[in-house]
Image (tube, rainbow, N blue to C red):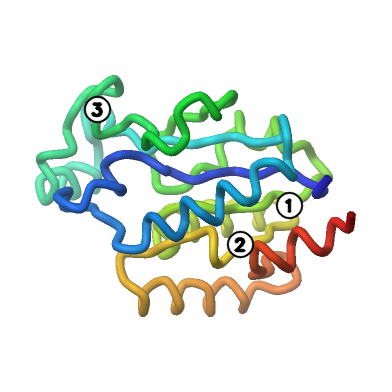
């Protein structure tokens, strides 16, 4: 079993649906990577969901002015986890922010544990979560082939940026992470 806690970031219909303004082109690749990781973490998995706030404040007002389709309640279909994860989710953390390093996720990970990140989008919510967790002193591993970005260039640039935060943040692959755990 792999050490640490797996946080699966925002694997939601709004990012899976090719017709969505927020579609993530390699979403299916990220799904495959996440599904490969799940057995190794057993009950140490938290799924997150990005949600629109009831009433945007500050700079979020301009953000939702640019993306008015997203101003939907938490139970709207677009915010549901995608069908590939139906029945697989136990713990879910909702946040109205890009970063998902919330007190709830921090408590689930624990003070001296490793946070393993997968999900979408690499250059936004994954990056924001990784940096906040690293700032809090948590070791972070980002599983490159279990993440996807708005495009390949953005995904790769975000991974390169996160590599600059070594040893606090390290980019790895599904195979390397699972091999590190051993038989």
Count of picture labels = 3
Q: Nearer the viewer, mark 2 or mark 1?
A: 2
Q: Nearer the viewer, residue 64 or 42?
A: 42
Residue beneath disc 2? 143
Q: Earlier in the sequence, mark 2 or mark 1?
A: 1
Q: Quadrant of residue 142?
A: bottom right
Q: Nearer the viewer, mark 3 or mark 1?
A: 3
Q: Earlier in the sequence, mark 2 or mark 3?
A: 3
Residue beneath disc 1? 138
Residue at horizontal 59%, vertical 43%?
Answer: 7
Query: x%, y% of residue 133?
Result: 63, 51
Residue at horizontal 47%, vertical 56%?
Answer: 30
Q: Is residue 137 above or below residue 173?
A: above
Q: Is residue 136 left or right of residue 94?
A: right
Residue beneath disc 3? 77
Query: x%, y% of residue 136?
Result: 68, 50
- As measured in the structure, the alpha-carbon distance from the residue carrying label 2 to the one carrying label 1 is 16 Å
Query: x%, y% of residue 131?
Result: 57, 59
């Amino acid at each position: 079993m792999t050490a640490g806690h797996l946080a699966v970031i925002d694997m939601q219909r709004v990012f899976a649906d090719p017709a969505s303004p927020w579609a993530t082109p390699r979403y299916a690749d990220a799904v495959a990577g996440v599904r490969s990781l799940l057995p190794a973490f057993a009950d140490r998995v938290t799924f997150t969901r990005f949600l629109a706030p009831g009433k945007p404040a500050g700079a979020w007002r301009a953000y939702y002015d640019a993306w008015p389709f997203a101003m939907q309640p938490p139970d709207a279909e677009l915010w549901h986890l995608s069908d590939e994860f139906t029945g697989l989710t136990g713990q879910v953390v909702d946040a109205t922010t890009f970063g998902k390093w919330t007190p709830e996720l921090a408590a689930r990970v624990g003070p001296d544990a490793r946070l393993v990140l997968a999900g979408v989008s690499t250059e936004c919510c994954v990056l924001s979560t990784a940096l906040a967790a690293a700032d809090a002193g948590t070791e972070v591993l980002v599983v490159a082939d279990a993440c996807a970005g708005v495009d390949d260039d953005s995904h790769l640039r975000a991974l390169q940026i996160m590599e600059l935060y070594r040893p606090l943040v390290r980019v790895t692959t599904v195979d390397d992470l699972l091999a590190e755990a051993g038989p």
